[in-house]
Amino acid sequence: MRARHKPWADDYLKENVSIVELNPTENKGKWKQIFTNDNPIHLEIGSGKGQFVSGMAKQFPSINFIGMELVKSIIVSTIDKVKEVGCKNVRLVNENAEKVTEFFEEDEVDTIYLNFSDPWPKNRHEKRRLTYHTFLEQYQTILKKGGKLVLKTDNQQLFEYSLVSFSQFGCTLEEVSLDLHALNDPTNIKTEYEEKFAAKGQQIYRCVCRFD
């Protein structure tokens, strides 16, 4: 579903510079200075309305979280969610994942989350999938050695494609769950989409892979 245009979004981002990084390229290699601590940095690519990144920040206060969302009319909702939980260990970036290496230095990120990414089901759109090898190359650059990527999706085809992509790239699969909610994982923070799909009885898939 296309997000409704919000003409006031630009001004709202500028009004919330304590949460939104308006010039993230300037932060490359300096994110720990931005957070003023040496805590691990976790990045969610495609943070949507912010339920996951804000929930994780609340659950894990000793980790710094960065939510990257391309759609400006959606990231404004993320700002509100971060304000609601009142956590100081969250920053937001209104940018495209295709340029992720422009915002992070080598070995700067500890964990990357891909939650319910667009599956781009048509073969001609394969290069747009966030688990395509060109994206994995960028993730490998910014992740520390041994850094992890956590993928959650309701789309079986994307999940299977991603498992193959991770394996071919040389990643180590640490977890493969075909029914995440059956695990009753107390640390699992649900996204808005996850709640919606689970309520309809759809299976939620999760995998964790390590970049060595």
Image (tube, helix red, strand yellow):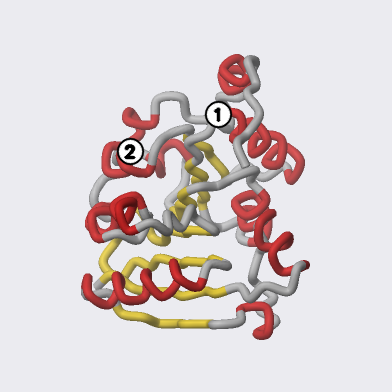
| Residue 130 higher or lower than 90, as above or below | below
Q: Which residue is mark 1?
A: 72
Quarter of the C terminus within the rendering: bottom left
Per the image, label 1 sits on a secondary structure element best described as: helix
* Residue 146 screen position, x and y as percent: 30, 71
Label 1 crowd bin: few (<14), some (14–19), many (20+), radius 10 Å: many
| Residue 156 higher or lower than 85, as above or below | below
* Residue 158 screen position, x and y as percent: 44, 67
| Residue ID at (27%, 37%) | 102
Whether residue 193 sits left or right of residue 174 in the image: it is right
| Residue 33 higher or lower than 160, as above or below | above
Q: Which mark is residue 52?
A: none
- Amino acid type at circle 2 is Phe
Task: For marks 2 and 1, give the CA distance.
Answer: 18 Å
Whether residue 186 sits left or right of residue 177 in the image: it is right
The image quarter containing residue 3 is top right
Q: Is residue 149 visible?
A: yes
Per the image, label 2 sits on a secondary structure element best described as: loop
Q: Which residue is mark 2?
A: 103
Quarter of the N terminus within the rendering: top right
Depth order, front residue of 55/46: 46
Query: In terms of sequence position, does the residue under pointer 2 or pointer 1 come before the other?
Result: 1
| Residue ID at (33%, 28%) | 26
* Residue 30 screen position, x and y as percent: 34, 38
Whether residue 116 sits left or right of residue 50 in the image: it is left
Check whether the beta carbons of the residues at disc 2 and disc 1 lie within 8 A of each other.
no
- Amino acid type at circle 1 is Lys
| Residue 133 higher or lower than 170, as above or below | above
